[in-house]
Image (tube, helix red, strand yellow):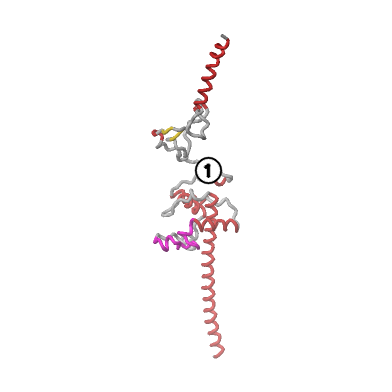
């Protein structure tokens, strides 16, 4: 009688063990097994870059076209180690905003040779194709592609304010597109620092030409004066 009762009590234990063994059998050898109420601890929230058409060994065609990666809200800025990059750019992309940027916007970076060199590297990667090596608007896109030439930095853009340069890099202007997605705010200011050096080179070249012209003019006047003096002596 006691043996019979022991057998009766052992039946639920045997059944439980069998059920646990069966629930541990899954197709994926890397799977930990079937989960009991997974939604209690595994969040069903939509996450970026996840294919919700295939989840937990099942295909859900209703979610195969779900867009999980969405655009961030307006005004969102990336988190970096620099407050300059993290602060949003609030001047609007309008003609009035362009003029305002030229009046009030100044570089927050301290100018130095190393800053200009870093700006030159970025310029060589992103700007030289159109603006040319010396900023004269004769890049390969213009010379070989036949696209309209941008203004030269030693010509029409010689006096372009740094704020307008940054604004243009941020939003784009004319045929030039925005570079906000390729360059951080700090990188844009570095490019501006180098472009300002190209503007100075244009001014220096112009000053040298003026000095040469003045020198030639003084030489001519001296020659004329010398000729008059010689004539007077001869007389």
The quadrant in which residue 83 appears is: top right
Please, what secondary structure does the residue beneath circle 1 have? loop
Q: Which residues are magenta?
A: 126-146
The quadrant in which residue 200 appears is: bottom right
Q: Answer above or below: position of 147 versus 48.
A: below
Instruction: Identify the image quadrant of the N terminus.
Output: top right
Give me the residue at 44% from left, 62% from top: 140
x then y, percent, for residue 60 = 41, 33
Q: From the viewer's perspective, is 130 left or right of 229?
A: left
Give me the residue at 54% from left, 44% from top: 87
Give me the residue at 52% from left, 61% from top: 198
x then y, percent, for residue 142 = 42, 61
Q: Answer above or below: position of 70 versus 115.
A: above
- Residue extending furthest toward the top: 1
Label 1: which residue?
A: 78
The quadrant in which residue 119 appears is: bottom right
């Amino acid at each position: 009688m006691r043996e019979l009762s022991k057998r009766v009590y052992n039946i639920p234990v045997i059944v439980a063990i069998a059920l646990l063994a069966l629930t541990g059998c899954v197709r994926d050898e890397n799977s930990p097994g079937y989960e009991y109420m997974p939604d209690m601890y595994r969040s069903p929230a939509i996450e970026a870059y996840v294919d919700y058409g295939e989840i937990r060994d099942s295909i859900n065609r209703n979610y195969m076209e779900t867009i999980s990666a969405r655009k961030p809200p307006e005004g969102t800025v990336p988190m970096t180690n620099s407050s300059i990059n993290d602060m949003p750019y609030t001047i609007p992309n309008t003609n009035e905003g362009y003029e305002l940027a030229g009046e009030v916007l100044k570089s927050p970076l301290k100018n130095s040779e190393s800053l200009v060199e870093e700006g030159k590297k970025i310029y060589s990667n992103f700007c030289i194709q159109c603006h040319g090596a010396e900023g004269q608007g004769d890049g390969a896109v213009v010379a070989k592609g036949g696209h309209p030439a941008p203004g030269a930095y030693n010509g029409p853009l010689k006096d372009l304010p740094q704020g307008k340069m940054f604004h243009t890099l941020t939003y784009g202007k004319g045929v030039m597109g925005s570079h906000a997605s390729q360059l951080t705010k700090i990188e844009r200011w570095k490019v501006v620092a180098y472009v300002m050096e190209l503007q100075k080179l244009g001014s220096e070249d112009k000053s040298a030409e003026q000095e040469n012209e003045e020198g030639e003019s003084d030489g001519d006047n001296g020659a004329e004066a010398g000729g008059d003096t010689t004539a007077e002596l001869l007389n």
